[in-house]
Amino acid sequence: MKRINEILLVVIFIMTAVLAAAVGLKAYDIYDTDRRLAREQEEMELAQVFARNEEAQSRVQEMQAEIMELTEDKEELERFIAQIQSGEMGAADESMSEDGTISGNGVLFGDETISGNGIVTGDGTVSGNGMLLGDGTVSGNGMLLGDGTVSGNGIILGDGTVSGNGIFMGDGTVSGNGIFVGDGTVSGNATISGNGIFGFTNDGEINYYDGTMTESSIFDAWRTIYEQPDNMTLEERRMLRTSLEETLEVNQSDRERIAENRRDFSGMKIACLGDSITAAANLENEENYQQYSYPARLKELLGAEEVYNLGIGGSSIGRYWSDAYVDRYQNIPADTDIIIVMGGTNDGFCVSDKEFGNLEERAGRTFCGDLDELMRGLRDNYPNAEIFFVTPLPNILQDYLMNERDYLLPQQNFVNVILTLAKEYDYTVIDLYNSNILDSHDVNIVADYVPDGVHANHDGYQIMAEHFASEIIQRYDQIDEEQAAVSVSGNALQNHSLFQNHAE
């Protein structure tokens, strides 16, 4: 009987094990099926995102062509940009806050008429695209801050007339393209020396700043206007001056810093990770076009041993679009001394709330998560490199695309994440977005430097390179100061210790 019981126990054990195995296999099969279905669902959703982003990128190219076609007519281009910014692209809706008539897309704050796209805050008439802040008339594209007339594109800060494209700061007339600081007239495109602004000659060529303008620069007379805190936002800067004014002033300062630089960069290697702006892909129809890219210009400005251009047109920081930075930063050579990462423009053309993510979760395939992974990877793989992150330039195409696609997010969202994470990883930020330079919301910037609304021309890339060079020099000067402070502190402690020992 005992033997039978033992046999029954063994049979029961075997049956239980078989049943458990069957249940386990069934559970695993269900788990595996669920995982496969989830993976298939994820792949399907990702394919949908890629298809959506491909269509958006195609639309961006069409928008670039539209803007380039308009650059030949400044008035039409200004009207076009104003419509995009107002969110009324293609519409002729009227807006009026007080008595008056608007026959175009404009805003009226006083009793008068706007026959084009303009803003009037006092009594006056705008018959073109302009901004009137005092009594007077704007018949072209201009900004009037005092009594007078602007018949072309200009800015008047006092009584007078601008009959061409100029900046006026006192009583008088600017009849050409010039900058005027006191009473008198500038009749050509020139500063006092007859050369173009900041070394730009009348034929469009660039003369490198040699340091001789530091004391006699025409901008010294109004430099205090630009002495503002470094942490100003884009909107705060826009309230003070146009992007063209800001660009020229910053470029002057950058050239002065480069001219005064005494640091030797000849043994350094620099890597620039980026998109089409880094690659200068918009110039690819020109022979040897990469010589005009900002990495190539940066190499000459700093005299660096090597500058690697790792820009790929259309690429994004995150894995929701093409050639993600987070998947290719490992291509940066191991012996690189300086790494510059400029991105976020294409991310802005692609990302919805879901792909944007958040800084709490930092999930993969989101802007927040993949940018965090990129910064962490650079820190771990290039511990000896000085790393710079560059925020994207504000561009009118982002606004244009957002008018058509309500899932897109403002550029500011991406900039804020870059600034937050860079601070967390202690990286230097070159904040182009909040700098107000080369902003294609300014019709003059588009006309002179950013012809398709997002990519620079030769002069624009030169300005960008000079700004990066200046920021790099400034950062290394800061490092020297920090090291000197540590050295002084260490010597003081050592002297104190020696004094104590001697006293004892």
Image (spheres, grey):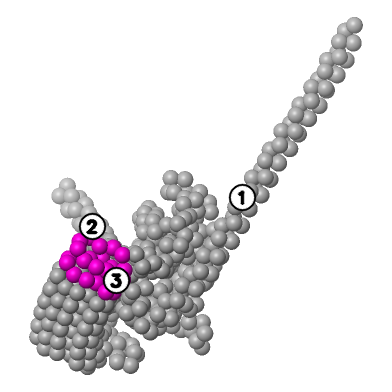
Residue 22 point in image, percent of width and height: 78, 30
> Position of 129 compared to 15: left or right?
left
Snapshot quadrant of residue 390: bottom left
Residue 489's label in the rendered image is 2
Rendered residue at 40%/80% (across/down)? 70
The residue segment tinted magenta is 94-117
Snapshot quadrant of residue 142: bottom left
Q: Nearer the viewer, residue 471 or 33?
A: 33
**Local SS, label 3:** loop
Residue type beneath disc 2 = Ser
Residue 187 point in image, percent of width and height: 19, 92
Dot 3 surroundings within 10 Å: few (below 14), some, or many (20 or more)? some
Dot 2 surroundings within 10 Å: few (below 14), some, or many (20 or more)? few
- Residue tagged 1: 42
Rendered residue at 23%/80% (across/down)? 139
Residue 405 point in image, percent of width and height: 47, 60
Residue 103's label in the rendered image is 3
Mark closer to the chain start, 3 or 1: 1
Circle 3/circle 2 CB separation < 8 Å: no
Q: Nearer the viewer, residue 141 or 503?
A: 141
Circle 3/circle 1 CB separation < 8 Å: no
